[in-house]
Image (tube, helix red, strand yellow):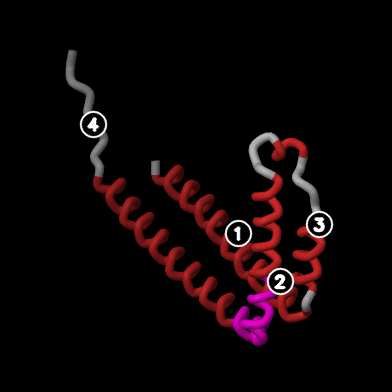
Amino acid sequence: MKVVLWLVVGLLAAIWTGGAWLAATSMEWAAQSLASGDMTEVARTMAGWPVPPWLALWVDPALWRALQDTFVASIEWLQRVLPAAPSLAGWLAAAVWLTWGAGLLLMLTLAGGAHWLLGRLRPSTPRPA
């Protein structure tokens, strides 16, 4: 049972680590794209896309256009408001890794407690027939 516990904890730790890495990398990429102006160009390009045929059944074209305009305006606003986005990304990446460390510490503490509790369980003895 203890082996299963640690296999599950190892799997969860790997998923937790992958999520933290993905979040930190995505934040750094977004900050660099925002600072260079690439994200604004991508947003403007995306604003010209028509409603996908599979989505046209559920979404009104006017709503689609309003969502695209809002997305472009949000990206342009972020570019104006966050001129120091790359340095901010460094701080956010550090915050992600600190959160990762705290979460991993909590996970290992809980697993250690479960390991200890599993060690205190006594196997049940079969009753005589």
Give the secondary structure at mark 4: loop
* CB within 8 Å, label 3 to label 4: no
Q: Nearer the viewer, mark 3 or mark 4?
A: 3
Tell me what residue is drawn at x 22 percent, y 28 percent.
125
The quarter holding residue 122 reads top left
Whichever of callouts 2 and 4 sits on the residue coming sooner in the sequence is: 2
What residue would you read off at disc 3? 48
Give the tally of numbered discs: 4
Q: Nearer the viewer, mark 3 or mark 1?
A: 3
Quick check: 99 above or below 122? below
Q: Nearer the viewer, residue 57 or 38?
A: 57
Q: Residues within 10 Å of mark 1 (few under 14, many from 20)?
A: few
Inter-mark Cα distance, 3 to 1: 34 Å
What residue would you read off at disc 4? 124
Q: Which residues are magenta?
A: 75-90
Tell me where residue 23 appears, x and y as whole percent: 60, 65
Q: Nearer the viewer, mark 2 or mark 4?
A: 2
Tell me what residue is drawn at x 78 percent, y 77 percent.
37
Whichever of callouts 2 and 3 sits on the residue coming sooner in the sequence is: 2
Tell me what residue is drawn at x 74 percent, y 74 percent.
33
Q: Residues within 10 Å of mark 3 (few under 14, many from 20)?
A: few
What residue would you read off at disc 2? 29
Whichever of callouts 1 and 4 sits on the residue coming sooner in the sequence is: 1
Left or right? Give the position of 126 relative to 57: left
Give the secondary structure at mark 2: helix
Q: Quadrant of the C terminus?
A: top left
Tell me where residue 109 appears, x and y as whole percent: 36, 62
What residue would you read off at disc 1? 18
Quick check: 126 above or below 4? above
Tell me where residue 41 appears, x and y as whole percent: 80, 69
Residue type, label 3: Gly
Q: Nearer the viewer, mark 2 or mark 3?
A: 3
